[in-house]
Amino acid sequence: MTDPRSDQPTTGAAAATDPDLTSATILVVDDHEQNLELIQAYAESIGCRVRVARDGLEALQEVRTDPPDLVLLDVMMPRMSGFQACAKLKADPATRDIPVIMVTALNEVGDVERAVESGADDFLTKPVHRLELVTRVKSLLRVRLLKKQLEATLEEVRRLTGD
């Protein structure tokens, strides 16, 4: 049996359940144009749809307008920091399940703790390495898309059973 997306042989049970990541949307948030373009290019190499925002407030508006499947969020930005934006996303029941990867030049233990406290699912330090970003994004996207599939299946079961 082959994977129709790549014409490569599938292997094991994991291959049968891997979601199609090309259906995913990533929101990249950074106030520095060079960082934004670099991270956007790395994210696009996965084959996902990629949107951008240039600060925390713009990110929150983008999420309200069209919720992404994952957010790559810079920490130090004007108007609203990544910590603040992440905390707002995670406090809202409509957006709390969207995975957030904090991207920061900060590397103190306290900064990592603050990212975790704000609800971040993962973090990357700058300069961002392509392989590390792609690997972490793919992993969190798979979990996100599988969870959405599970929720849709459970909803269908409820509908069919009248629960």
Image (cartoon, grey):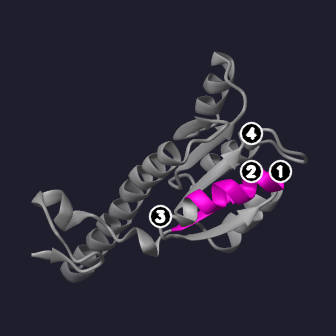
Instruction: Give me the residue at 81% from left, 58% from top.
Output: 54
Instruction: State the image coordinates of residue 130 (x, y, percent, origin top left).
Output: 54, 48
In front: label 4 or label 2: 2
Judge whether residue 161 is colored magenta: no
Say which of 4 and 71 sits in front.
4
The residue that label 1 is drawn on is 32
In primary-sequence order, the first of circles 4 and 2 is 2
Q: Is residue 160 left or right of residue 13?
A: right
Secondary element at tag 2? helix
Secondary element at tag 1? loop
In primary-sequence order, the first of circles 1 and 3 is 1
Residue type for callout 3: Ile
CA–CA distance in space, label 1 to label 3: 22 Å
Judge whether residue 34 is colored magenta: yes
Q: Is residue 123 left or right of residue 17?
A: right
The residue that label 3 is drawn on is 46
Residue type for callout 4: Val
- Label 3 environment density (alpha carbons within 10 Å; few <14, some 14–19, many ≥20): some
The residue that label 2 is drawn on is 35
Contact check, label 2 and label 1, Cβ < 8 Å = yes
- Label 1 environment density (alpha carbons within 10 Å; few <14, some 14–19, many ≥20): few
Q: Is residue 163 visible?
A: no
